Amino acid sequence: MKVKRFFAKSMAEALRQVSEQMGPDAVILSNRRVDGGIEIVTALDYDENMARQSLGAEASEATNGARLAEMQAERHRRLEDELSRSRSRIRDVRESRAARGQGYADASFAELHRAASEDFAEPVSQNAGNENYSDEFARMRAEINSLRDLMSGQRGEPEKPGINAVQQRLAERLQEFGLGNDLASSLSRRHKGGKLEDGWKQSLKMLVAGVRTPNQEWLDEGGVYALVGPTGSGKTTTIGKLAARYVLKHGADSIALVTTDRYRVAAHEQLFVFGRILNVPVRVVDESNTLDDILDELSDRHLVLIDTAGLTSTDRGYQEQLAELARSHHSIRTHLVVSATSQPRIMKSVWHCYKMAGLTGCVMTKIDEALTLGESLGFVMETGLPVAYYTDGQKIPGDLHHAEAVPLVRLGVERLKMLQQQAAAEKMPDTERPREIA
């Protein structure tokens, strides 16, 4: 959320400045008359939940959205006043040092800010020649410490041990992205210093590095692949998309489909429909035909895709199905199908249920239905499962994509921006010009 204050002689002039500098998506937090004209405080990407978090205990006084916006504006005024006073103090100290020839004439604001913000492990020497100078530094340090509290949104509350204000704000943004608290904190702590945006870019690069994807597609590499996962995760539809893409590229003569779902009535119907449409053989594992027997018969096929029953650990046949995949003498590469709409805890539970099948990767489905993608990306980072494909719709085979780390993380960032824009739009019905919050 970007907050900025504007001054002008008239309301029309102030609104013109807001429009030019903040754009049509700006939200007016407050406006009031001041000496010489009008003061307006505006915000971009304004979010009431974020505002309440940043205000902390003070937010309890806000009984409606208008009061909350005014409090956010007042907080911004205090922050700017603190900045102005601190800059003035630093300027005075620098000029005083320059007049005495004591070496701070060329010091940058950042250097003096650091000097005033440090814990003064080495106190200012009394040989500096002026006791008042030490007092001045002490007062400036107190002001900047107060400024730091304001900037971190934790006035009156201690910072978390071992994490500074920028790291904490970075962790909060990563959680908005969808990452879990532990992973967000771990990534944010690696940002040792600098601006929030630098830390954000660094964290995204670490996400890209942590998301593993194969270089080659199944369709070209060939082999035997089994999709496992709970009912409704999209296993059968994903197999239909893979088969359709393969047939379009290589023809129907070198592919076959297999299902191990013999536990539910009419469980094979959708797969048989795909087989008839694509002119691809579909085989069923049952009492008369074991998985290995069927795979022996299909050994001349370049690609074999195995659909499985969506069973949980409490279902009949759960152990039998997974053991059948694990003990096969064929090289079956088993992939977990994970819905991007699932909660992180459910993803982890599903992974624990199916990892005995010797998982070699995963397929992410229903990307288009997920509000954020950080949950899915965090899951594959923590489990180490390579992402082979992801799906983002029902079109066959159009909504199937070979996974790559950079586009996936970029898609997650775009989804976060879209979510923020939707939240802002709900609070500002007329996007043609800034409006006050009702």
Image: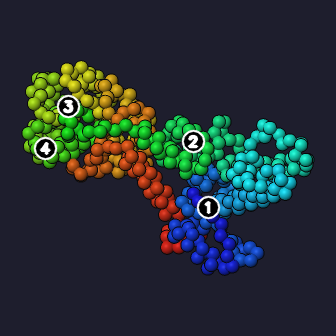
Residue 224 shows which numbered tag?
Answer: 3
Q: Is residue 423 left or right of residue 135?
A: left
Q: Where's the N terminus, which quadrant?
A: bottom right
Mark 1 or 4, closer to the camera? 4
Q: Residue at x 47, y 45 (%)?
A: 204
Lower position in the chain sequence, tag 1 or tag 4? 1
Tag 4: residue type? Answer: His
The answer to whether 336 is drawn above or below residue 356 in the figure is: below
Structural distance between the alpha carbons of marks 2 and 1: 24 Å
Q: Residue at x 68, y 60 (%)?
A: 76
Q: Residue at x 55, y 51 (%)?
A: 197
Classify 10 Å Cα crowding around label 3: few (below 14), some (14-19), many (20 and above): many
Tag 2: residue type? Answer: His
Tag 3: residue type? Answer: Val
Residue identifier under label 1: 3
Lower position in the chain sequence, tag 2 or tag 4? 2
Structural distance between the alpha carbons of marks 3 and 1: 55 Å
Where residue 148 sits: x, y (%)?
A: 70, 49
Lower position in the chain sequence, tag 3 or tag 1? 1
Structural distance between the alpha carbons of marks 1 and 4: 56 Å
Tag 1: residue type? Answer: Val
Secondary structure, mark 4, is helix
Classify 10 Å Cα crowding around label 4: few (below 14), some (14-19), many (20 and above): some
Where residue 223 sits: x, y (%)?
A: 19, 32
Residue identifier under label 2: 191
The residue most toward the front is 101
Residue identifier under label 4: 250
Q: In which quadrant of the rendered view does residue 261 lie?
A: top left
Structural distance between the alpha carbons of marks 3 and 4: 16 Å
Lower position in the chain sequence, tag 3 or tag 4? 3
